[in-house]
Image (spheres, rainbow, N blue to C red):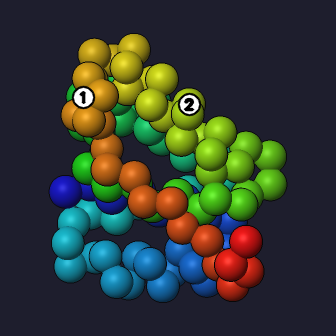
Amino acid sequence: MRILIVDDEPACRALLALSLRPHGTVEQAGDGPEAIAAIALALSEKRSYGLILLDITMPGIDGQMALRTIRLMEEKHGLAVGRGAKIIMTTGHGDKE
């Protein structure tokens, strides 16, 4: 399985990558635009990601905007709702709000 970790904090990406390497090929993106570019390329090459871990709070394009963009890109490539990547939203914030 191809896995994409998207987080602006290198330490968070490294920790997640270490945990997920036994489960597939792990790639990393440092922000929303980098992730969107990687996903667009993967979809165009018909080798999409099975799992994406997406940080909620990133500068520029945040996780929620990236999620909407990813789902639109999947739809344009013919992936029906529920057939695209499994996406887990992550955050390093401890605030319960």
Query: Does the rendering let one see residue 42?
Result: yes
Query: Residue 91, located in which quarter of the rendered image?
Result: bottom right
Q: On residue 69, which mark appears?
A: 2
Query: Residue 23, located in which quarter of the rendered image?
Result: bottom left
Direction from residue 80 to residue 30 in the image, left or right: right
Q: On residue 26, which mark appears?
A: none
Q: Position of residue 49 (x, y in %)?
A: 31, 46
Three-letter code, disc 1: Lys
Q: Nearer the viewer, residue 10 or 80?
A: 80
Three-letter code, disc 2: Thr
Q: Position of residue 78 (x, y in %)?
A: 28, 16
Q: Is residue 6 above or below residue 19?
A: above
Quarter the C terminus occupies: bottom right
Q: Is residue 89 above or below residue 83?
A: below
Direction from residue 21 to residue 68 in the image, left or right: right
Q: What residue is drawn where x is 45% and y is 24%? A: 73
Q: What residue is drawn where x is 31% and y is 44%? A: 85
Quarter the N terminus occupies: bottom left
Q: What residue is drawn where x is 54% and y is 67%? A: 90
Q: On residue 46, which mark appears?
A: 1
Between disc 1 and disc 2, the foreground one is 2
Earlier in the chain: of badge 1 and badge 2, it is 1
Q: Residues within 10 Å of mark 1 (few under 14, many from 20)?
A: few
